[in-house]
Image: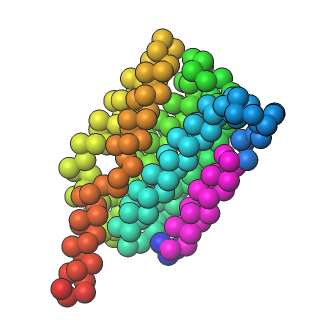
Amino acid sequence: MERDRMEAFSDGVLAIIITIMVLNLHIPAGNTFKDFMTEMPKIGIYAMSFAYVGAYWNNHHHTLHTVTMVTGAILWANLLFLFFISLLPFAAAWFGQNLFDPVPTFVYGLVLFLTAISFFLLRFAIVRCDECSHILREAMENDRRGKFTGIIYIIALGLSFCAPRVAVALHTMLLILWFIPDKNIEQAIYSADREKNGE
């Protein structure tokens, strides 16, 4: 399978996820600012979840740019990533209705954690493919951000039951951390493109 086909399928799934999340928002019951403010927590969770999907879409695009051949392992790893991130609308809706309650906070964080693990497995599957570019392998060897992310997610999951607001703050911090794509990959892709074009 060509890389472009897998990327187009993934883009479609991510677009549907965002659509489902916005459909979970409800029109305020009345026509006052007070009525609108009652929906603000759900809008805030939607905005955070939208940003998470956007950050993954951006990093997913850069990651797939390093692929020269799509193998079965890469396809399955990509589907696993799409499965976990497709649970985000459900987790976000439940969390939005029960803001900072321990179990919904935990489930929301768990979905984010499993999505992060599956994204790591996708990158690992690409690295293991001998026919794929070594750009991602070199970037992952210097990836301190990835190791730091896993630790923070585990801490946030534990805090969901005793300090849910702190757990959400940690999730927000990780979102900011991953909002900018991996600069090592960007630089490696840029260098490879220049070399390919003979610059």
x and y percentages locating residue 180 in the rendered image: 35, 53
User: At 24% from the left edge and 58% from the top edge, which residue is drawn?
Assistant: 184
Q: Residue furthest right?
A: 29
x and y percentages locating residue 27 in the rendered image: 77, 41
- Tell me where the magenta segment starts and ends, as one range: 4-22
Describe residue 42's horizontal placement relative to residue 116 as left or right.
Answer: right
Q: Residue furthest top?
A: 162
Residue 77 visible in the snapshot: no
Place residue 117 in its image quadrant.
top left
Classify 159 as above or below 35. above
x and y percentages locating residue 19 in the rendered image: 68, 53
x and y percentages locating residue 166 in the rendered image: 43, 21
User: At 38% from the left edge and 61% from the top edge, which residue is drawn?
Assistant: 63
User: At 56% from the left edge and 24% from the top edge, which residue is drawn?
Assistant: 105
- In this orientation, which residue lies closer to the viewer: 181 or 60? 181
Q: Residue furthest bottom?
A: 198
